[in-house]
Image: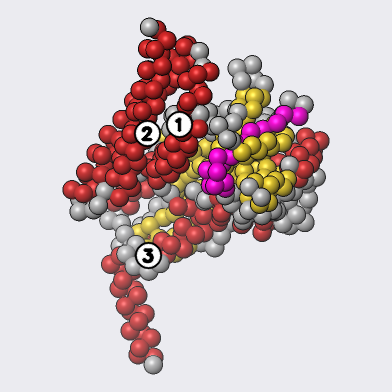
């Protein structure tokens, strides 16, 4: 047994001599207070978090695992560190957060000095990331409640010897996690390094959120919570009960806008809770040019089997209630343009649904429309239909190219091929509509 242990020890030393080793420490200028009983006037749920690399080395910085925790990691750690502040309760005040980062990789001086000693003597170096954390709470009218940015620096100190075991000596300096011994060519020390680095980063980000949340005005936060809890309502659609809420959203991203520019209907099959995703989203109000809220119509594509229109009803100038209408004579112009911000699959689904709705509008509404509309209105519709043709041609051409590339690569073309076929189907629906509109305008001109 003693001989076996001695052999394994000699093997380990041999591997160290061949592969080299190092030591790393993990530090931050901001660490958690450790007060798990800390409370604030409101409880919060972190609904979004994004890290945006800025100057110096954005591509490298965005790839550093220990510097870029995701939303789930921060949510979980926030609830663990401050269980009386953060929760996954749907009725808590939602918070959107983002961090702008500047990554500075290890310097070349340590490498140069190590080269002079043939890699035998380790020299300390570090990689650093500076964080600027922003957060916002969106109030009941769609305005942002913000705090001053919170800044901190994360640093991973390290030294490495390419040959020999000197790099395994603990690197001096403070470390918020146990130092990690690194082996360059074997073992799982790299994964442990990433985990410890990520833990320190996540803890610092959570602390930054708490500091910023303390700054927010409690009176406005109370109104947000009250409006959120009161905004969960039940609604009947085609004889079935659903739950809904209206949420203020930023079409260009919350970091790019000072005010929300649209209210979106979120439809749920049951009363909303933290893990429940909405079955459907529809924009039901937008800000007009003067900054006031204006209801806009939308259609339920997944929840309703027939054509059901939804829009917001204002209360004191704010979208507060839902108006649901089963449409017997759908407006033709509601279905002419493809409106989607998703990828190919979402575009296919949007066009397929629009094709069915367009057929109903053609059969139910077109005859009366040709009689009621003025010539100017008919000319506007002709322009919209022609614009729809141009949009379809562009989508279809791109889809055909993607499908051909997929087939050339040994595939079937998949969703791209389906998208091209769906566009062709809509093209065939639009042709008789355009012909009827032009024929009516020509008849009136005789």
Q: How crowded is mark 3: few (under 14 residues within 10 Å), some or many (20 or more)?
A: many
The residue that mark 2 highlights is 429
Pick whichever of labels 2 and 1 is earlier in the sequence: 1
Above or below, 32 relative to 150: below
Element at label 2: helix
In the image, the segment drawn in magenta is: 300-315
Above or below, 326 relative to 33: above
Query: Distance from label 3 to label 1 (Cα)?
Result: 70 Å
x and y, in percent, of residue 10 in the image = 33, 79
Tell me, yes or no, whether the two marked residues, 2 and 3, touch with CB atoms within 8 Å.
no
Query: Distance from label 2 to label 3 (Cα)?
Result: 66 Å
Please identify the residue farthest to the bottom as the structure is shown: 1
Q: Is residue 38 left or right of residue 166?
A: right
x and y, in percent, of residue 181 in the image = 44, 64
Residue 134 part of the magenta segment: no
The residue that mark 1 highlights is 362
Q: Can residue 337 be seen in this view?
A: yes
Q: Is residue 228 left or right of residue 249?
A: right
x and y, in percent, of residue 374 in the image = 50, 13
Tell me, yes or no, whether the two marked residues, 2 and 1, touch with CB atoms within 8 Å.
yes
Depth check: give the residue in front, 273 or 378: 378
Q: In this view, does 423 lie to the left or right of 302?
A: left
| Quarter of the image that includes the N terminus | bottom left
Q: Which residue is drawn at 41% across and 61% down?
A: 190
| Quarter of the image that includes the C terminus | top left
- Of discs 3 and 1, which sits in the foreground? 1
Q: In which quarter of the image is residue 354?
A: top left
The residue that mark 3 highlights is 183
x and y, in percent, of residue 157 in the image = 47, 52
Above or below, 331 relative to 438: below
Which numbered dot is residue 328? none
């Amino acid at each position: 047994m003693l001989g076996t242990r001695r052999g394994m020890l000699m093997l380990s030393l041999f591997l160290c001599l061949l592969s080299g080793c190092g030591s790393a420490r993990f530090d931050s200028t901001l660490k958690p207070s450790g007060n798990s009983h800390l409370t604030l006037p409101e409880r919060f749920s972190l609904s979004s978090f994004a890290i945006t690399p800025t100057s110096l080395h954005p591509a490298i910085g965005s790839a550093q695992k220990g510097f870029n925790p995701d939303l789930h990691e921060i949510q979980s750690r926030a609830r663990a560190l401050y269980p009386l502040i953060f929760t996954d309760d749907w009725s808590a005040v939602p918070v959107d957060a983002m961090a702008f980062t500047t990554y500075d990789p290890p310097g070349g001086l340590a490498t140069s000095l190590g080269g002079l000693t043939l890699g035998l003597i380790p020299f300390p170096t570090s990689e650093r990331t500076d964080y600027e954390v922003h957060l916002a709470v969106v109030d009941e009218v769609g305005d942002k409640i913000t705090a001053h940015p919170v800044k901190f620096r994360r640093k991973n100190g390290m030294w490495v010897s390419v040959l020999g075991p000197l790099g395994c000596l603990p690197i001096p300096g403070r470390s918020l996690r146990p130092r990690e011994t690194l082996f360059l060519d074997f073992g799982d020390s790299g994964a442990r390094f990433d985990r410890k680095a990520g833990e320190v980063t996540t803890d610092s980000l959570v602390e930054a959120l708490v500091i910023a949340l303390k700054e927010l005005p409690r009176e406005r936060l109370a109104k947000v919570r009250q409006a959120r809890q009161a905004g969960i309502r039940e609604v009947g659609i085609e004889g079935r009960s659903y739950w809904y809420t209206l949420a203020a959203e930023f079409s260009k991203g919350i970091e790019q806008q000072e005010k929300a520019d649209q209210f979106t209907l979120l439809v749920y099959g049951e009363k909303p809770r933290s893990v429940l995703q909405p079955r459907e989203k529809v924009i039901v109000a937008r800000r007009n040019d003067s900054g006031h809220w204006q209801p806009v119509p939308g259609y339920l594509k997944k929840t309703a089997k027939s054509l059901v229109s939804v829009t917001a009803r204002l209360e004191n100038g704010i979208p507060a209630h839902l108006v649901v209408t089963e449409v017997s004579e759908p407006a033709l112009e509601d279905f002419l343009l493809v409106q989607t911000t998703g990828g190919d699959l979402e575009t296919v689904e949007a066009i397929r649904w629009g094709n069915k709705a367009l057929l109903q509008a053609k059969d139910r509404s077109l005859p009366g429309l040709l009689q009621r509309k003025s010539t100017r209105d008919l000319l506007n519709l002709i322009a919209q239909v022609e614009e729809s043709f141009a949009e379809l041609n562009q989508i279809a051409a791109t889809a055909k190219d993607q499908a051909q590339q997929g087939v050339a690569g040994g595939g079937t073309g998949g969703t791209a091929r389906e998208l091209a076929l769906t566009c062709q189907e809509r093209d065939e629906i639009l042709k008789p509509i355009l012909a009827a509109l032009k024929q009516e305008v020509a008849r009136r001109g005789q």
